[in-house]
Image (tube, grey):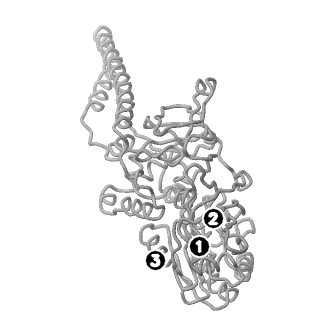
Amino acid sequence: MTHWLTLSRAAHLVGVSRGVLQEKIRNGELHTSEGTVSTEELLRAFPQAELDASGAFERVTLIKERAFARRVQEHILPTQELLAQRLFSQTEELADVRRHLVRYHDLVVALQARLRARAGDAGDPALRALEEFLEKGLSDVLATENADVLTVMDDMLKVMSARVTVRPSGREFLVEGHETLLQAGLRAGLRFNYGCGNGSCGLCKARIVSGSVARVQTLEYPLSEAEKLQGYTLLCAHTAASSDLAIETLEASGPLEIPAQQIVAKVRAVTPLAGDTCLLHLQTPRTKRLRFLAGQTVTLGAAGAGDDVHASYAIASCPCDDRNLLFYIARNPNDAFAQRVFAGALKTGEAVTVWGPQGDFVLAQSDRPLVFAACDIGFAPVKSLIEHAMAVDAAESLSLYWLATRADGHFLANQCRAWSEALDQFDYSLHTDVDAAAGAKPLLQAMQADLFLGRCDFYVAGPEPFVEAAAGGLRTSGVPKRQIMTMIV
């Protein structure tokens, strides 16, 4: 019996991104039916010997664990109760399939007996041939077949990680361990509506269309009886109890649908990354997390002995970890907030007010290859976009071109190397030039040598001279304006 897989599950099984599968589909190397792929077709495109030897699945898993700093609880297996519920659900499904197969078998045997009797009475060779055809067909079906390794793996993964389909968007994500539906959705790059993350505000309300959920934390928000009857639940307080789950909820389509927020966060750490660059790590309260899109900025404010200081910075972290906000602060004599950071006046545990988010430097809904061009601290929003693109797992390739105008400007070169070693679809190149505008020219030349520019989406971030030079060069090269997103940092 043919076993069909969604693209998300197929990518999970063979250890590649959805973008790789989509590229094979576009090139006619992988055939699909109504958005699904058969295990036979998947094994043809990715031979079992290659799967055993490649280790791709392990490499991708490792980099995602490191890149997104996933919490310890997300590595834990599903609870015994969840495993029991999912196994029970699978048992019911298998029992239903078995009942249908038995009925089909009985029907074919009864038909065969009638044909045999009619052929004997009438002496009709055509009826005899039809009866023999049924006999042979039934024998072939009942013959022992080799186990389909991908089908076996898929059945195992259904117990360990549930598949969730979101309506009306049709997007899918996997729930691993005992993470909540909200955590899993954010990790996969979905733009769910939410607020507190702990079951008290009700903003993450969604309707269960099919499947079942289990509560994994207490919730204070009272659902009405009518909402309960309609199947509504809170994504932040529940996980998937069944192997397949369908929910109905709306996602933000862009920055305009993300509300303005004001949150008092605490300084978790201030870490020097280079002589003129520090990492500022803020942590929001558990009950009030920052909802933002990758690539956006916020305004930070801190009180001092004299006047309060404020400055706007791009968020360098992924929305999938909404409590831990990372910022790269560059030494700047005209930035009072940065001066306080480098003077050591911003201590661990000190309160910092966060206003935002702002900006529309966010990923477009597209499956084109993604190209990121950053200069100096412009790497901050680009890093957030790259991590989000990895989480969404849709682009067929990711390319980074990073220009530094000072000796220690590539302050996270090791992170780029780790991405490149772990993800086949990611590549990067580092460039240096004391002049940002002049340095944009060799970046463009490298892009032209490496890429077919017209079929890519470009994200350019850095100081104004760099952004103008790079974006202007791309337009001159024939890249449509709608495929060039810019941010001045």
- Badge 2 local density, few (<14 within 10 Å), some, or many (20+)? many
Task: Give the alpha-carbon distance from disc 2 to disc 1, as whole Å.
Answer: 9 Å
Identify which residue, 144 or 384, lies in the foreground: 384
| Quadrant where the image shows the C terminus | bottom right
Q: Residue at x 49, y 79 (%)?
A: 413
Task: Give the alpha-carbon distance from disc 1 to disc 3, as whole Å.
Answer: 27 Å
Task: Give the alpha-carbon distance from disc 2 to disc 3, as whole Å.
Answer: 29 Å
- Badge 3 local density, few (<14 within 10 Å), some, or many (20+)? few
Choose the circle earlier in sequence order: 2 or 3.
2
Q: Residue at x 70, y 52 (%)?
A: 258
Q: Which amino acid does label 1 sit on?
A: Leu
Q: Which amino acid does label 2 sit on?
A: Val
Give the residue pinned by disc 2: 352
Give the residue pinned by disc 3: 414
- Residue 445 in the image, given as x and y percentages of width and height: 62, 84
Choose the circle earlier in sequence order: 2 or 1.
1
Q: Which residue is drawn at 56% across and 38% down?
A: 234
Give the numbered dot on residue 346.
Answer: 1
